Structures are given as C-alpha cells and as structure tokens.
C-alpha cells in the first residue's frame, strides 16, 4: 500500500496552461505539505495544511492554489504556467504537523513547462 | 531564520569504505535536525532525527549522526557503505516553537564505486 501517492508522475505542458497535481495519503495523518524541488535539487516548502486548514503559506506566487477537500487529500492547482515552474513537486504528510512527527513524502511529480 | 549548509555537492566513495556527510546549521536556539535520503526518482525518506538528549543518533540503514552544538554541525556517518546507498542526502533543520517547517540544505549526491 502506497502511503503518500501523487498523480500524475510526469506532467508536460505549454506555458500559459492551467494544471493540477493531486496528492492522497492513507496514513490517517492530519497535516499535508507541498514542496518544490528545483533543477538544482533545492527543496523548499510551499504550503502546509492541517485538517484542511492552511497553516504554512510561503512566498509563492498566487498562481499556485492548494486545495484540501478532506484531510487525506491535498491538491495543487497552478494557473498560467511559466517556464520557471518546471520542477519536481513533492507532497508529504505528518501526524499532527509538529516537527517531532516524521514527514512521509510522495514519489514526486515532475512538471515540465515548454 | 534558520539555514542549512551542506558543503559537499558530490562525494564519491568505494563500496565498503566509511562515509561522512557534512551539515552545518544556523539557528539561535536548539534546533530539530534531520537527515533525509532521496533515491533516484523517489521521494525523500527520513534516515534519522535529533531533538534533544544523546547527541549521537542512530538511524535506519546503519546510519548515525552526531550533533555538535559548538560546531553547529550534524554530520551523517556510516562505517561501511553499500552500493545501494548511492543517492542524494539532505540535511534539514526545524525551529522549535517556530513555524514548524523544515528548511533543507541543497543536498549531497553520493556515488558509490564498486
């Protein structure tokens, strides 16, 4: 059983398009995260949700909008895609969002904007 | 704000040799410290973490790390490397009582020669 799953695994699209990435966790965790890993492998948090409530919202363009329909799902919608959005996006989850809790990462979604 | 430096971008060792990956952090108080491993095409997996107490922390896959407050370091070690350890390794720091977010270093790529 996959603990944290993401779809799609690969996403290739044109500049200006709108796309979504989906994330689901079956661990019963309360907190979910989105991270962006750039071409240099630098990993940075974008958002976190705890029980469907936005907790962390880093300096991310408002073209990025996370949505949490329930605490097992956290989707990422990106409007008007730009070349600089090309990256690997990781979803993660943890029990309560405390740093004492282990974060479990999904396999990543590689987004390529042409 | 906390930050993490991993001075080595790429390290190559022979199988069976010992390994030490360096990590230095910047944070005013006692941090939460983590090491994650990312195998090619995979998400991140927690190797070990330090919050308090014994400064030598044991993790999975035979890894250990030592917290040295005087040097602001949290270096990862393994006495004998296996070919399957080839991966990207990330050190991360979290602020106690802060925003409960992880700040990652830029990673060290480990290559293992047969």
Image: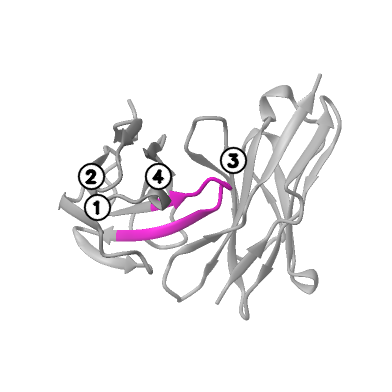
Q: Could you give the CA–CA distance between mark 1 and mark 2, rounded to whole angstroms?
A: 5 Å
Disc 4 vs disc 2: which is toward the camera? Answer: 2
Foreground of the two, B91 or A60:
A60
Rendered position, A15 above or below B27: above
Mark 3 touching mark 4, by CB under 8 A? no
Is residue A100 in the magenta section?
Answer: no
First in residue order: circle 4 vs circle 1: 1
Residue neighbourhood size for the residue with mark 1, other residues' Cα within 10 Å, grouped as few (<14), some (14–19), many (≥20): few
For label 1, the SS is loop
In the picture, the disc for residue A90 is: 4
Looking at the rendering, in which quadrant would you find the N terminus of chain A? top left
Question: What is the chain identity of the residue bearing mark 4?
Answer: A
In the picture, the disc for residue B37 is: 3
User: Where does label 1 land, which residue?
Assistant: A80
Q: Is residue A112 left or right of residue B23?
A: left
Question: What's the magenta region?
Answer: A35-48
Question: What is the chain identity of the residue bearing mark 2?
Answer: A
Q: Could you give the CA–CA distance between mark 1 and mark 3, rounded to whole angstroms?
A: 33 Å
The image quadrant of residue B98 is bottom left
Rendered position, B95 above or below A6: below
Q: Could you give the CA–CA distance between mark 3 and mark 4, rounded to whole angstroms?
A: 14 Å
Q: Is the magenta stretch mostly helix, strand or loop?
A: strand
């Amino acid at each position: 059983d996959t603990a944290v799953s993401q779809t799609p695994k690969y996403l290739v699209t044109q500049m200006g398009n709108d796309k979504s990435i989906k994330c689901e966790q079956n661990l019963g965790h309360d907190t979910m995260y989105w991270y962006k890993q750039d071409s240099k492998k630098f990993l940075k948090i974008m958002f976190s949700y705890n029980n469907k409530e936005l907790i962390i919202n880093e300096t991310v363009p408002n073209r990025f909008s996370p949505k949490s329909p329930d605490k097992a799902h956290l989707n990422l919608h990106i409007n008007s895609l730009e070349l600089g959005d090309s990256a690997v996006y990781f979803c993660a989850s943890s029990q309560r969002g405390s740093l004492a809790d282990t974060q479990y990462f999904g396999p990543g979604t590689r987004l390529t904007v042409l | 704000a906390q930050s993490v430096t991993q001075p080595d971008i790429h390290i190559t060792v022979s199988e069976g040799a010992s390994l030490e990956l360096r990590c230095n952090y910047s944070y005013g108080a006692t941090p939460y410290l983590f090491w994650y491993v990312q195998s090619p095409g995979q998400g991140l997996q927690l190797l070990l973490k330090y919050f308090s107490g014994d400064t030598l922390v044991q993790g999975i896959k035979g890894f250990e790390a030592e917290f040295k407050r005087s040097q602001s370091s949290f270096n990862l070690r393994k006495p004998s490397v296996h070919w399957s350890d080839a991966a990207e390794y990330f050190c991360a720091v979290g602020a106690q009582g802060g925003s409960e977010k992880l700040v990652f270093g830029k990673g060290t790529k480990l290559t293992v020669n047969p």
